[in-house]
Image: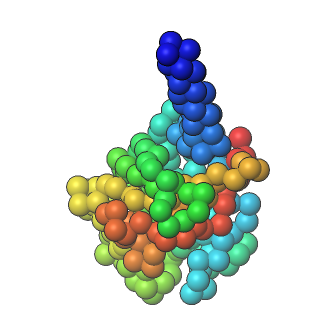
Amino acid sequence: MKTSITRLLLLAVVVTAVVAFSPASDTKKALETLSGTYADTKAVDWGRGTFGTRVFTFDKGRWSLLFTLALDPQMKQPVFVFRTVGSYKVLEKSATVPDAYNALFIEDKKWVTLKTADKQLAQGFGLDQCGFDIDKEKDISLTGCSLWKPVAECNEDHDLLALDKDGKLYFGLRPDDNNMCTADKRPARLNVPVVHTR
């Protein structure tokens, strides 16, 4: 009897150890402890004649994003730069997207820099009513602007996160209206990856 109990206890320890050190567990831990900068290797086609580059920085549970939108893949005709900072949590595995985890990104602050002098273009992106001066970053945390809501109205980004065997980092593909403020708005597929640059 004593031997059977001992064997059961040993089996429980082994099973626990296997679960604790499973690839899924390792991936989640890696996502929770991301460090350094991840960026697009080239401009990503965002559709409708626009291209963008993302630069994410992670440090001890904190994150930041620098997103630049342009009208050309060489990024020589920038329209605006969006910047945000905050914290993040990796949640459960996605039930719909293989190898991805649900994630929650908190945005503490939001800024936008207008990069174009073309007033019609700025109007087309909804940037003409936000009081921007060209090349001067403006804090829009309280007011919001265009598709960005004020922090008080939406400071949550319900996203996806995935990390492949080569260390490439994937986020969810954002919807056209940029609204990921609630869990039901979480993307249903992954975007192209960003790579660790430093």
Q: How is the image coloured?
A: rainbow
Instruction: Give how far across and how far down residue 110 sits, in percent.
Output: 38, 55
Identify which residue is drawn at 37% across, 51% down: 107
Q: How many marks?
A: 0
Residue pushed farthest front? 1
For this rendering, which residue is in front, 74 or 63?
63
Q: Does residue 185 appear left or right of residue 78 in this picture?
A: left
Does the rendering let one see residue 68?
A: no
- Percent x, y for residue 106? 37, 49
Whether residue 158 is situated above or below residue 125 in the rendered picture: above
Q: Quadrant of residue 33?
A: top right
Closer to us: 193 or 139 = 193
Locate the C terminus by quadrant.
Answer: top right
The vertical placement of 170 against 176, above or below, is above
Residue at the outermost right position = 166
Nearer the observer, 107 or 113: 107
Task: Give the residue at the far left of this rendering.
Answer: 152
Instruction: State the image coordinates of residue 170 (x, y, percent, origin top left).
Output: 61, 58
- The quadrant where residue 129 appears: bottom left
- Where 166 sits versus 22, above or below? below
The residue shown at (54%, 65%) is 97
From the viewer's perspective, is 154 left or right of 189?
left
Identify the residue at image location x=53%, y=24%.
8
Residue 44 left/right relative to 142: right
**Residue 147 position (above or below residue 142):** below
* Towards the viewer: 13 or 55: 13
Residue sitting at x 49%, y 59%: 94
Where does residue 46 sit, x and y in percent of width and height?
Answer: 59, 77
Residue 60 visible in the shown view:
yes
